[in-house]
Image (cartoon, grey):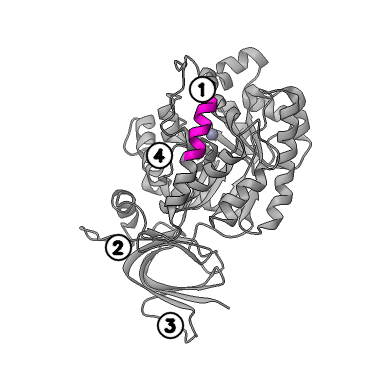
Amino acid sequence: MNDQLYQNYFIFTGKSPDDYFRGNLWVRDGHIVKVFGSEDPIPKLSWASQTNGEGKTLLPGMINAHTHLYSTFACGLTVRPFHPGSFEEMLEQLWWKLDRALLSDDVYWSAKTAAMRLIDHGVTTIIDHHSSPYCVQGTGALLSRALIEESGMRAVLSIETSDRDGAKIRDLEIEENLALREEKQKFPGKMGALFGLHASFTLEEETLKRVGQWDYPVHIHIGEGDEDGKLHEEKYGCSAFERLQRYDVCKPNSLLVHGIRLSNKDTEALKKSGCRIAFNPQSNQNNGAGLPHYERFKERAIPVLLGNDGFGFDFSRDIRALLISQHHVGQSPLGFSLEDLFEVVFRNNAAYASALLGETVGVIEEGAVADFVTFRYMPITPISEKNFLGHWFFGILESGKPEEVVIGGNVLKTGGVFRKSPEEMVREAEKVSRKLWERMEK
Ligand SMILES: [Zn+2]
C-alpha cells in the first residue's frame, strides 16, 4: 500500500462554500482516506511520502465539462477565405476545414500537448468532444493513450457524429462511439464515454433514429447559432430540442452544450429529460453567438455545467468569464452570485463527471480520488471560511498556475514545475502542426 501524507495546507473541500480549514490529507493508492484538521493526531504509519504544504491552499482539481482538444493546432492558424456571415460559415471556413485535415498524428499530438497545458493549469478531468471525420477509426484508443495512459488525466470521450461528410463517414463515427464503451473498460475510474453528435442541423433523420435506439447518453451542441434556432424552425418546422426528442436521442445524463437559443418550451422539456446543459461563455463571446441565461435553468433546477468549447487551456478564465458574463446578461451584479458559481463549478461539474467516471471526483472527501491542486496564495485581506469564495474568485483564480497538481495520488506538477519535460513534446507537435497547416493550404 502506498500511503501519502499531505500536511499543513489550507484546504477547501468543494463540498460547501464554507468548507475551508487548516488541515491534512491522507491518500492511499490514489484515493483520499481521511481529511482532518491540523489539531487532529496524525496516524502513525510508514508513509511512502510526506509533503509539507507550508500553508499553501489546496483545492479539488478543475473539471472542464466541454472541450475540443482537436482544435489545439488552431492556435495562430490563418485560414482564407475567412469572412463568416453566419455560424455555419464560421464552421465551414475554419473548424470543418481544420477537422477534415486531421490525421492520426495530429489527433495524438493535439491531445497530448493539450493535456500538458491543461494539467499545468490545474485541470484534472475533461469532457472532450472530438472531431476528425477523415481519421475516425481508432481515435478513441489514440485519445485514451495520449490523455489517460501517457498524461495521467481523466477524460470522458465522445466522437462527433455528423452527416456533413456523407453516410460512410457517419457510419464510422457511430461505430467509433460504440467502441468507446469497450475502450473505457480498460481505464476504470479514469475514462468515461458519451455518444458524440455534432448538432441537430447537421444530422439526418435516419441518423437520429439510429442513435435514439441505444441507451447511451449523448454529448451534443444545441442552440449555438441560428442554424439551431430560427433557421432550424424554418427548415424542420420544430426546434432543435423537439427534433432530438422526437427520436428519443437525449437520454438521461446527456450533455447539451450552449443552450443559447432554447425557448421556454424547450427548457421546460429539458427539465423533464434529466439532461445537463454546459455553458461556454468565452467561446460564445468570441464567436459573437450570444449568451445563455443562467436564471432560466436555475429556476427549473436544470444543472448547469461549465466548459470552454476548446477555447484555450486556462480554465480559471472561463470560471471568471461565467460570473462576469451572467452579470452582463442579467444587467445586474446581483443576478449571478458566487454561490451560483460554486454550484456550477464545484457541485454540478463534479457530480456529472463522477457519474460518468464511476468515481467521486472534484471534491476533497474520504473515498474520493486524490485529484487536487495547490496554490501559494498569500491573502492581503482577512480570510476565513465565511469569505473563502470571494478570495477564490478575486485572489486565487488570478494568481496564476497552481504550484502542485496531483491526479489519483500521482504528482504531475510540483514546485511549479511540470514533471514531464515539455520541450520534446512541443518540438514534435510543432513539426506535426506545420504539416497540417500545409495540407490545409492545398
Ligand atoms: Zn463545442
Magenta residues, start to end:
431-442
Q: Nearer the viewer, mark 2 or mark 4?
A: 4
List the residue tagged with mark 3: 42
Q: CA distance from mark 2 to mark 3?
A: 24 Å
Q: Secondary structure at mark 4?
A: helix
Q: Nearer the viewer, residue 87 or 244?
A: 87
Q: Nearer the viewer, mark 2 or mark 3?
A: 3
Q: Which mark is residue 384?
A: 2
Check the picture and name the quadrant holding the N terminus: bottom right
Q: Amino acid at mark 1?
A: Glu
Q: Looking at the rendering, which quadrant does residue 96 occupy?
A: top right
Label 4 near ligand 1 (CB < 8 Å): no
Q: Nearer the viewer, mark 3 or mark 1?
A: 1
List the residue tagged with mark 4: 322
Mark 4 or 1, nearer chain start: 4
Residue 211, magenta (yes or no): no
Q: Nearer the viewer, residue 319 or 68?
A: 68
At 61% from the left and 16% from the top, the residue drawn is 233
Q: Amino acid at mark 3?
A: Ile
Q: Is residue 345 visible?
A: no
Ligand 1 is found in the corner quadrant, namely: top right
